[in-house]
Amino acid sequence: MTPETEKIYQHALEVLKENDLGSYTVPTKGLYPFQWNWDSCLTALGQGHYDENRAWTEIETLFAHQWPDGMVPHIVFHVDSDGYFPGPRVWDTRRPAADTSGITQPPVAGFAVKRLYDRATDKAAAAARARALLQRIDAWHRWFYQMRDPAGEGLVAIIHPWESGRDNSIDWDEAFERVPTEGVGDYVRRDTQHADPAHRPTKAQYDRYLYLVQLFRSLGWDNSRLHDASPFRVVDPGFNAILIRSMTDLADLADAFGDPAIAAANRERATKGLAALETLWSEPDGQYLCRDRVTGELIQSASIGGILPVFAAVPRVRAHEIARTIEGWATKVKYIVPSHDPADPRFEPKRYWRAPAWLVTNYMIQDGLRAVGETVVADHIVSSSLELITQSGFAEYYDPTTGEPCGGGRFTWTAAMVIEFLEAA
């Protein structure tokens, strides 16, 4: 490493360690005081470079709060804190070990566990930890198709925008209009006290987020009922691609550990999912699109959700077309990859997932592009990511037109992704 990259690396380590609470990390102090699902799995990748044991503990802590039906919740409320809304009393899921939310998040655990195992220095210890997680991750994968793919089409739906990890994406706007706001009542948000309100979801969006939480709570968080009850049901190609990649990686682990049943089940689901994903391809957009499961129509919203499928083993021709789409977007912004098409009039460069660039999605996209030989675009993504760090520090996300830091500061998974980029250099 150069002196400059070494300085960045050490700064990233500081951020990871200051947000480490022993057995789990918080995304950043103040704004997000609990454990988040996909944050933890991706953070573990960065931790693995300096403390393999700590990396495994991060994921194990998350899965210790898996629900009996197989779901892994998107938040685990390990401690009492009024720094985040909605907190455990709003969710009211009544979990025995610790309060959790009642919805899930992108299932990246299978990918993270395989990557930790593949590069472990102590293979015997890593194998023991990975084996112990194998059935738990498989149960989560199985849960998705039981609870979120009732017609057996091979693609799962999200029933709340927060499940996508891309909370206020433009992709959800049209379907979200169906969600009423009557009866939500008064509440005090905490996110706008820690970050610029102009960077966060609007109150109208938050009212609808809370309506869905209250609806699901009224159904006793019975996952067998929530899919059909939700007025918001969207098939997101990015979410499905992450699931497909994790199933593929879990199948490889299961083969290595002599569990052919888990390997076969995950490969079968992944193969069916990849075939079904083709129904979401949009030739004019050069990427995949979301589908509104309520109307059956594709959602005309070209976003990072349709770019993320390169993370899975989509047909090479699709991956190459997506690389060309990214190159086109790169001519319109200074930093890539923006979370929405810069040519769309709804593009908002500072507002959460409505355009800003995120290092975590950059990491997954460049990983998929490298697998198909698109190294020039992948390298551009990495260099752009590191330029953002040099200019604006370890922010939650960034304005892709100026590089301005947005959202929370000293962000855990941003630091983890920087470590990943620098270790691979």
Image (cartoon, grey):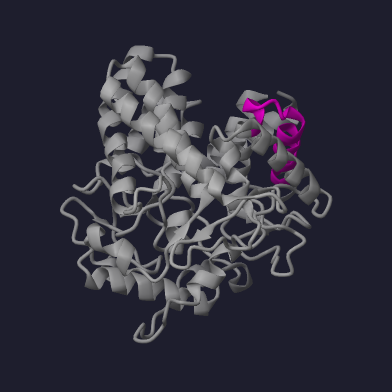
Viewer-proximal residue among 381 and 310: 310
Residue at left offset 80%, top offset 48%: 328
Viewer-proximal residue among 60 and 253: 253
Give the residue furthest to the right: 331
Give the quadrant of the N terminus.
top right
Give the residue furthest to the left: 96
Q: Position of residue 390 (x, y in %)?
A: 73, 43
Residue at left offset 67%, top offset 29%: 6
Q: Which residues are magenta?
A: 369-389
Q: Position of residue 111 (x, y in %)?
A: 45, 32
Q: Is residue 69 above or below residue 354?
A: above
Answer with the quarter of the image where residue 298 lies.
bottom right
Give the quadrant of the C terminus.
top right
Q: Position of residue 227 (x, y in %)?
A: 32, 62
Answer with the quarter of the image where residue 8 lies.
top right
Prevailing SS of the magenta stretch: helix
